Amino acid sequence: MANPKKPSEKKNTFGFDVIDSDIYAVLRTFKAMDKIASEDLRKVATELAQEAADAIQNAASFNGRQASALASTVKVARDRIPKISIGGEQSITSSGAKAGDILIGAEFGSYRYKQFPTRSPQSPTGKGNLGYFIFPTLKMLQPRIKAKWVEGIDKIREEWKGRAVSG
């Protein structure tokens, strides 16, 4: 499941990664494997994160000026799980607004601040709002990204078994 993390190590930046106890078990297993396996996993995760980043940037381009401006701040982190960050301290609007300062308004809207769209619809679970371009995109991509990541893990594990047996 996509998990928003705030605050991150970078001011005004939200990071998104996958949180699941099974995934942590996989990462612990990869620590015991050689560096080639870990590097292969980083490649798989980075490709999947790039796919998500591209989709978020595309969705942002259809959701108003602030969202379009935020598209340039979507970055892929190089990690063993698909991970992206959005926002930051850079000024992205003609008024000099920082990306991190407009991120929440652009994604979830506001009744108070007219520069943002109206509040996004409430989640069916009653916990928060659905969002406009980040969360809906991640929710749509999540099953595919998870399946591709697991497929990549299986492939790397099989290759590693072959290296361990022949090595």
Image: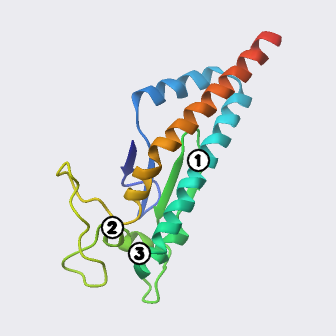
Q: How far apart are marks 1 and 2 (CA)?
A: 24 Å
Res. 41 image quadrant: top right
Q: Residue 48 carries which label?
A: 1
Label 3: how many Cα within 10 Å (few below 14, some 14–19, many 20+):
some
Residue that numbered label 2 is attached to: 104
Q: Which mark is residue 63?
A: 3
Q: Which of marks 1 and 2 is in front?
A: 1
- State the residue in front, 28 or 153: 153
Q: Indicate whether 93 appears above or below 30.
A: below
Please name the residue shown 68% across and 27% down the image. Answer: 156
Q: How far apart are marks 3 and 2 (CA)?
A: 13 Å
Q: Identify which amino acid the numbered label 2 is placed on.
A: Ile
Q: Is mark 1 on a helix, strand or loop?
A: helix
Whichever of callouts 3 and 1 sits on the residue coming sooner in the sequence is 1
- State the residue in front, 164 or 122: 122
Please name the residue shown 41% across and 61% down the image. Answer: 134
| Image location (x, y in percent) of residue 66 | 41, 78
Res. 53 image quadrant: bottom right
Q: Do the residues labelled 3 and 2 touch (CB within 8 Å)?
A: no
- State the residue in front, 26 or 32: 26
